[in-house]
Image: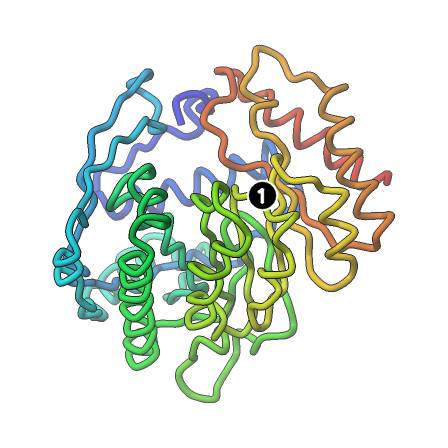
């Protein structure tokens, strides 16, 4: 945030912790609309998220971190293994999910009293399901040991992912029973997801279920495993979680251009992430009209003293050409930015350049 804060546009002034979160929502929304709107969608209300509590699953992240910039939240992690022995699986258990309606109502009334005569205020639930089991496991164990055990302890690795999948399925059951889902989303992990293929926000047929929402899965750590192993240890288990959602979006930073045939085994797949480390031309040819190609250009392009617009046009031109040639629906998302070279104009100019190319293509 310290690299992006121009003329204190992102400086928070509220003292109340919860109101600071509302102020942050307002300031960042205005900031993005002013400096890098792209195809931005702004909802006509202030969202008040339902206050949801979880008792936990029996383990938590234990880590050491290393910082090179005290003002930057991006740090290096060294995780401590919570599952050194087979018996450690016994630590895991399903959490108890609860909805704090009283606190939710208090926050709704507090914000409504302040802003309700200016802009509507609305209580919202969970509008998407995120499942990144192996990314979570990497934080419980560390990356090296996780990858070694896929080869040396395959049965244990299956038991671990199966247990965590069972826990997620139980969480889903509780979310449904507590009526915690919402079906009025515009974004899923930075990417657009507006569609008429799920119930409208005025849904009135009773509590929403996983069939009425988007699911998003990923296994970034599986960039280092074979396609067969990726399917066996992740896709097969994702069928029980995001595969049960109304629509699904798979992938993050892992290269999937050579794994699309296993990803599309997920039921109701709608969108696939294609990263800078994937071959976008190969991916576009395979994806064709069947799914949305969610392209992630290289964020390192903005982590410089000045944006190289010629190099950017070459990168984006390759993406647009591949998608146009193969009739792909595509969204282009700049994400995973850890630095803009202390020059926010790099990101503003990135947005302007790419939007011009998209509109002219």
Relative to 225, residue 14 above or below: above
Q: Which residue is located at x 62 percent, y 27 percent?
A: 348
Q: How many marks?
A: 1
Q: Which residue is located at x 84 percent, y 48 percent?
A: 324
Viewer-side residue, 198 vs 248:
248
Relative to 248, residue 191 above or below: above
Q: Image quadrant of residue 94? A: bottom left
Q: Image quadrant of residue 124? A: bottom left
Relative to 289, residue 4 above or below: above
Relative to 96, residue 34 above or below: above
Q: Secondary structure at mark 1?
A: loop
Q: Which residue is located at x 42 percent, y 87 percent?
A: 206
* Quadrant, the N terminus: top left
Q: Disc 1 designates what residue?
A: 255
Q: Position of residue 68 (x, y in %)?
A: 32, 16
Viewer-side residue, 167 vs 20:
167
Q: Position of residue 341 (x, y in %)?
A: 51, 16
Viewer-side residue, 212 vs 232:
232
- Give the left or right position of residue 250, taking residue 111 as reference: right
Kindly give the residue lying farthest to the front in the view shown.
Answer: 152
Kindly give the residue lying farthest to the top in the view shown.
Answer: 305
- Give the left or right position of residue 317, taking residue 275 as reference: right
* Quadrant, the C terminus: top right
How would you rate the neighbour count of disc 1 (Cα within 10 Å): few for under 14, some for 14-19, many for 20 or more? Answer: many
Q: Position of residue 200 (x, y in %)?
A: 57, 76
Q: Image quadrant of residue 120? A: bottom left
């Amino acid at each position: 945030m310290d690299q992006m804060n121009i003329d204190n546009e992102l400086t928070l002034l509220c003292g109340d912790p919860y109101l600071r979160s509302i102020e942050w929502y307002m300031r960042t929304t205005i900031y993005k609309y002013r400096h890098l709107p792209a195809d931005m969608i702004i909802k006509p209300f202030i969202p008040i998220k339902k206050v949801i509590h979880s008792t936990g699953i029996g383990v938590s992240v234990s880590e050491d971190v290393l910082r090179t910039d005290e003002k930057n939240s991006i740090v290096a992690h060294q995780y401590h293994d919570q599952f050194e022995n087979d018996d450690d699986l016994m630590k895991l258990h399903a959490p108890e999910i609860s909805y704090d309606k009283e606190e939710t109502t208090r926050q709704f009334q507090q914000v409504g009293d302040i802003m309700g005569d200016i802009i509507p205020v609305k209580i919202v639930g969970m509008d998407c399901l995120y499942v990144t089991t192996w990314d979570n496991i990497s934080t419980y164990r560390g990356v090296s040991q996780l990858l070694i055990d896929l080869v040396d302890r395959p049965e244990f690795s299956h038991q671990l992912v199966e247990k965590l999948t069972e826990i997620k399925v139980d969480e889903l059951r509780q979310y449904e029973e507590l009526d915690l889902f919402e079906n009025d989303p515009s974004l899923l992990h930075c990417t657009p997801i507006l569609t008429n293929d799920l119930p409208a926000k005025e849904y009135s047929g009773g509590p929403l279920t996983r069939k009425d929402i988007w699911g998003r899965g990923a296994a970034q750590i599986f960039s280092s495993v074979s396609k067969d192993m990726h399917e066996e240890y992740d896709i097969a288990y994702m069928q029980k979680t995001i595969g049960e959602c109304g629509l699904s979006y798979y992938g993050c930073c892992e290269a999937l251009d050579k794994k699309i045939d296993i990803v599309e085994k997920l039921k109701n797949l709608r969108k696939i992430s294609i990263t800078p480390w994937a071959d976008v031309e190969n991916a576009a040819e395979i994806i064709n009209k069947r799914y949305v190609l969610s392209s992630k250009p290289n964020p390192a392009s903005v982590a410089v003293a000045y944006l190289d617009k010629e190099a950017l046009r070459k990168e984006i031109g390759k993406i647009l050409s591949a998608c146009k040639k193969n009739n792909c629906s595509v969204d282009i998302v700049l994400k995973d930015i850890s630095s803009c070279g202390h020059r926010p104009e790099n990101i503003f100019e990135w947005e302007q350049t790419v939007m011009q190319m998209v509109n002219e293509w």
